[in-house]
Image (cartoon, rainbow, N blue to C red):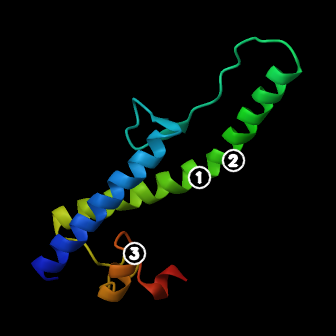
Amino acid sequence: MEKAFLEKQKKKLEKEKTVIENQLKSFAKRDEKLKEDWDTIFPKWNGEAGGASLERAADEVEEYSTLLPIEYALETRLRNINLALEKIKKGRYGKCERCGKPIPKKRLKVSPEARFCLKCKK
């Protein structure tokens, strides 16, 4: 694969990585032991009594449960981006992980973190 294309893909991946990490930082924290793992921050109950306090706590728990699948999707995408960046570094970028054939540039332009060709993705 041409050096110019790889460099362009690398910049694209690094930019997307920064965007995703910033999105995750807005509602999750990075696991200290597993650097690629993020944990959505669970709301803390301050011990207040009363209907308004309980309603606010319920809203926070509902928001937490809404953020969990978002965290998972962003985390998965971030993991794939990191894998793609590692492949660029090792000279293995753009090859399907299943069949070993080259992934078309058209697919890589749309999804630079793609791990499989379209045939194997199905």
Q: Which residue lies at the image location 55% right of the left edge and 83% below the top edge? A: 122
Spot the residue most to the right: 51
Rendering coords of residue 52 (x, y %): 84, 23
The three-letter code of the residue at mark 2 reads Thr
Image mark for residue 70 = 1
* Residue 14 rendering spot, x and y as whole percentages: 27, 59
Which residue bears the numbered disc 2? 66
Dot 3 lies on which element? loop
Q: Mark 2 or 3, which is nearer the eye?
A: 2
Mark 1, Cα crowd under 10 Å, few <14 / some 14-19 / many 20+, is some
Q: Looking at the image, how many numbered discs can be counted on the residues?
A: 3
What is the crowding at mark 3: few (fewer than 14 residues within 10 Å), some, or many (at least 20)?
Answer: few
Q: Residue at x 34, y 73 (%)?
A: 112
As shown in the figure, which amino acid type bears the numbered disc 3?
Ser
> In this orientation, does residue 104 appear?
no
Q: CA distance from mark 1 to mark 3?
A: 19 Å
| Foreground of the two, 84 or 67 | 67
Q: Is residue 100 visible?
A: yes
In the rendered image, the residue lying farthest to the front is 52
Give the residue at mark 3. Answer: 111
Query: Disc 1 marks which amino acid?
Result: Ile
Does label 2 or label 3 sit earlier along the sequence? 2
* Secondary structure state at the residue bearing disc 1: helix
Q: Is residue 87 left or right of residue 34?
A: left
In the rendering, at what x and y percent does residue 55 appear?
Answer: 83, 29
Contact between labelled residues 1 and 2, with CB atoms less than 8 Å apart: yes
